[in-house]
């Protein structure tokens, strides 16, 4: 049995009681439904309601996950990254990805499966220009994102040098940095229910429309 004598996590559980979800309650497409749910998370003052887990599988077949931030919704779900990072290498090898949002206080989760596509340079430049100065410099500092460093001093030295090179208002878009748009094929909305009889309703892309199906909890 998987057991930790110092803390028995097997006994940690909560009962979900905030509500249910029926097909007729949902919007006609997953984008409208997602906007409704993330707006509820924002109104509930949840910390970083746009935080999501991005899961990728590289060319070696090994899965990897990390938390990133949603930065836009149109016909896909938008995020920005270093194009030399581990996640970017994974996406280059296999563009099929998953996004997971968890709003525990609302007893809600959204799981998105789709394909990640690079945004245009113009889109990436427009977003980069809107970022705070420190974040713009940070993108340049982490040019070799995911690579091994000897210590933090190297990061701090690069930060100082780059701030001297690029004053505020004059930071160019790095050629190694930009956006991805995840085009969904399936979007599952999960609402916790009493006794683990959760509601799971999934949008599946079918031609020009979306079909909604209920999944077993």
Image: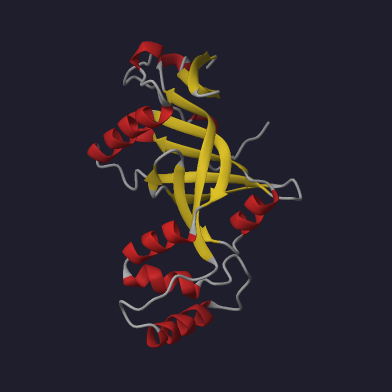
- Above or below 39: residue 68: below
How many tags in the picture?
0
Q: Quadrant of residue 216?
A: top right
From the top left corner, tell me how far across and down residue 189 is, in percent.
Answer: 44, 25
Residue in view at x 76 percent, y 50 percent: 60
Residue 83 seen in render = yes
Front residue of this view, candidates 23 and 183: 183
Residue in view at x 56 percent, y 48 percent: 117
Residue in view at x 62 percent, y 36 percent: 3
User: Which colour scheme appears in the figure?
Assistant: secondary structure
From the top left corner, tell me how far across and down residue 200 is, in percent.
Answer: 48, 19
Residue 202 seen in render = no
From the top left corner, tell me how far across and down residue 134 is, in percent.
Answer: 35, 72
Is residue 139 left or right of 65 when viewed as pictured? left
From the top left corner, tell me how far across and down residue 199 is, in percent.
Answer: 44, 17
- Above or below 77: residue 127: below
């Amino acid at each position: 049995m998987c057991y930790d004598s110092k803390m028995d996590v097997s006994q940690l559980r909560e009962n979900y009681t905030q509500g249910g979800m029926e097909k007729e309650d949902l919007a006609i497409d997953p984008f409208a439904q997602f906007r409704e749910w993330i707006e509820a998370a924002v109104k509930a003052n949840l910390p970083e309601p746009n935080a999501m887990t991005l899961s990728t599988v590289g060319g070696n077949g090994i899965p990897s996950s990390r938390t990133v931030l949603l930065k836009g919704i149109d016909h896909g779900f938008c995020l920005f990254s270093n194009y030399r990072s581990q996640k970017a290498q994974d996406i280059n090898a296999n563009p099929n990805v998953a996004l997971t949002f968890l709003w525990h206080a609302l007893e809600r989760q959204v799981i998105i499966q789709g394909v990640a596509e690079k945004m245009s340079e113009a889109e990436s430049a427009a977003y980069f220009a809107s970022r705070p100065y420190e974040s713009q410099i940070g993108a340049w500092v982490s040019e070799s994102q995911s690579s091994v460093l000897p210590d933090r001093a190297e990061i701090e030295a690069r930060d100082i040098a780059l701030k001297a090179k690029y004053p505020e208002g004059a930071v160019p878009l790095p050629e190694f940095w930009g956006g991805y748009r995840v085009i969904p094929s399936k979007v599952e909305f999960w609402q916790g229910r009493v006794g683990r009889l959760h509601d799971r309703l999934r949008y599946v892309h079918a031609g020009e429309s979306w079909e909604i199906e209920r999944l077993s909890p």
